[in-house]
Amino acid sequence: MPYDHRNPVTRSLPAALAALLCSAALAGCGAAPEAARSAQGPGAAATTATPAPARTQAAAATTAARPLAGRTVVIDPGHNPGNFRHGREIAEKVDIGTNHKECDTTGTSTNATGTQAAYTEAAFTLDVSHRLRKLLEERGAKVVLTHDADRPYGPCVDERARIGNAAEADAVVSVHADGSAKGNRGFHVIVPAKVKGGSADTAPIVAPSRTLGERIATAFRRTTGTSPANYLGDGTGLDVRSDLGGLNLSTVPKVFVECGNMRDPKDAALLTSGVWRQKAAQGIADGIVTYLQG
């Protein structure tokens, strides 16, 4: 209401207001926060704590995007483009635990035609390995290649195993393509047999290597649209072997992926396609991720 100087009650309002203001001033800063908290209600503390859940969500998103962070994967590109120039060196025998075997081989190739040169296994494995490395690094993995065509030949099969062992790899994948007869089609994954002899003892890695092989076979089939080999493995896409030094001497889970048969025209058409090689790399990467995530 308007101030009336004739009314003693209304005349005393300014004085009362002044007294209230003085009381608030004397109370200092301590009362104001308490009043603010009372006004905000019991949910105030939760409101001020929102950065913590936000950080948790960000960390979860990072983990989902980089599921292989902290993991080490060794990629072993089969053969070396320079091997064919070093026949004597790669023919020298090395100890693979159970016996001795050639240091390495030149690998196979597709058949040359009147319009197209042969495509070597060594070129194929290096290309797929580069694509695979990129995919794994994008997912957070530390990736080690046993070679990158940065040496004249090799490494020998025993050294390839040592590289994976020294890296304490969570998984090692050796990339290959087969050189079987025409009509033999499809991919397969080679897993280690139980071997004990000399410096070879695969007992600790047989089970995890098989699991790794199964995961890769499943993902490879789904991603590439190709079928397991029709000439070995009884349709499982898996082949157990005891004669490969790269497996016999490994102390960490390791498999070989034979992506297809370079000597079959239909498989060769896939293996020489950059689009299909990207699918092959993706399938192997997906299998490694599912294996490492358990």
Image (cartoon, rainbow, N blue to C red):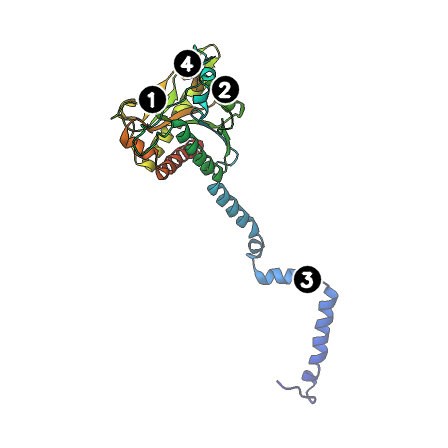
The alpha-carbon separation of the residues under discs 2 and 1 comes to: 23 Å
Q: Residue at image x 59%, y 63%?
A: 39
Secondary structure found at label 2:
helix
Is label 2 or label 4 in front?
2
Is label 2 or label 1 in front?
2
Most extreme residue toward the front is: 114
Residue for badge 2: 159
Task: Give whichever of 146, 41 is nearer the camera.
Answer: 146
Secondary structure found at label 4:
loop
Task: Give whichever of 141, 205 is nearer the camera.
Answer: 141
The alpha-carbon separation of the residues under discs 3 and 1 comes to: 78 Å
At label 3, counting other C-alpha atoms closer than 10 Å, the crowd grade (few under 14, some 14-19, many 20 or more) is few
Q: Is residue 272 above or below residue 256?
A: below
Check disc 2 and give the amino acid type: Glu
Q: Which mark is residue 252?
A: none
The answer to whether the residue labelled 2 contacts the one labelled 1, judged by CB atoms less than 8 Å apart, is no
At label 2, counting other C-alpha atoms closer than 10 Å, the crowd grade (few under 14, some 14-19, many 20 or more) is some
Q: Which mark is residue 195?
A: 4
- Mark 1 and mark 4 lie on one chain; the one further toward the N terminus is 4
Left or right of residue 270, residue 202 in this image: right
Q: Can residue 294 be seen here?
A: no
The answer to whether the residue labelled 4 contacts the one labelled 3, judged by CB atoms less than 8 Å apart, is no
Residue for badge 1: 239
Is label 2 or label 3 in front?
2
Check disc 3 and give the amino acid type: Ala
At label 1, counting other C-alpha atoms closer than 10 Å, the crowd grade (few under 14, some 14-19, many 20 or more) is many
Q: Is residue 25 above or below residue 63?
A: below
